[in-house]
Amino acid sequence: ANPDLDAWWFDGGWPFFAPPETLVEIKEFRENGGYLISVDSFWPMLDGLESGMADYLVGQDFYKMGVLGVETLVEAIKGNEPESEMIDTGMEVVSPENVDEVRKEKTAWE
């Protein structure tokens, strides 16, 4: 429907829950020079990147999100205000150049 589309951005790595061979449209888009960036950088998304289905993954630190979320809620229950309106949980950018290093720091379905 959009033949001039240059890039796709997925807000979540949902397509990569499927086996790469089932993502025919994405494969064709990539083979024709399309760029693909996806949010999330846990195990299935790494597989998608390694199979050539994405250029970059932008991930969140889920562990830190959980820890800081609970700590912030506990402090709020105690009546304490958060130190800041913004709670930075970090960001991870994964590319074909660093995917091996990132994979070493994760476990399957982290």
Image (cartoon, rainbow, N blue to C red):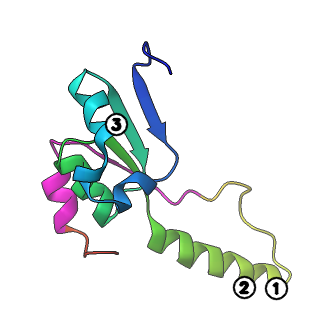
Residues tagged 1 and 3 counted as in contact (Cβ below 8 A)? no
Marks 1, 3: nearer the viewer: 3
In the rendered structure, which amino acid carries the disc numbered 2?
Val
Name the residue carrying label 3: 25
In the rendered structure, which amino acid carries the disc numbered 1?
Ile
User: Looking at the image, which is closer to me, 62 or 74?
Assistant: 62
Is residue 44 found inside the magenta-colored segment of the image?
A: no
- Quarter of the image where the C terminus is located: bottom left
Is residue 98 found inside the magenta-colored segment of the image?
A: yes
Among the 4 quarters of the image, the one containing residue 37:
top left
Find the distance from the CA under tag 2 to the CA under tag 1. 5 Å
Please provide percent x and percent y for residue 47.
22, 57
Name the residue carrying label 2: 74
Does any portion of residue 48 appear in the rendered image?
yes
Please provide percent x and percent y for residue 102.
22, 59
Among the 4 quarters of the image, the one containing residue 86:
bottom right
Question: Looking at the image, which residue is at 43% across and 12% down?
Answer: 4
Question: Looking at the image, which residue is at 30% across and 62% down?
Answer: 44
Please provide percent x and percent y for residue 60.
45, 58
Name the residue carrying label 1: 77
Label 1: how many residues lie within 10 Å, few (<14), some (14-19) or many (20+)? few
Q: Is residue 12 left or right of residue 34?
A: right
Q: Is residue 57 left or right of residue 48?
A: right
Q: Which label is found at residue 87?
A: none
Find the distance from the CA under tag 2 to the CA under tag 3. 46 Å
Residues tagged 2 and 1 counted as in contact (Cβ below 8 A)? yes
In the rendered structure, which amino acid carries the disc numbered 3?
Glu
Find the distance from the CA under tag 1 to the CA under tag 3. 48 Å
Marks 2, 3: nearer the viewer: 3
Question: Looking at the image, which residue is at 25% across and 21% down?
Answer: 32
Label 2: how many residues lie within 10 Å, few (<14), some (14-19) or many (20+)? few
Question: Which residue range is magenta in the image?
Answer: 88-104
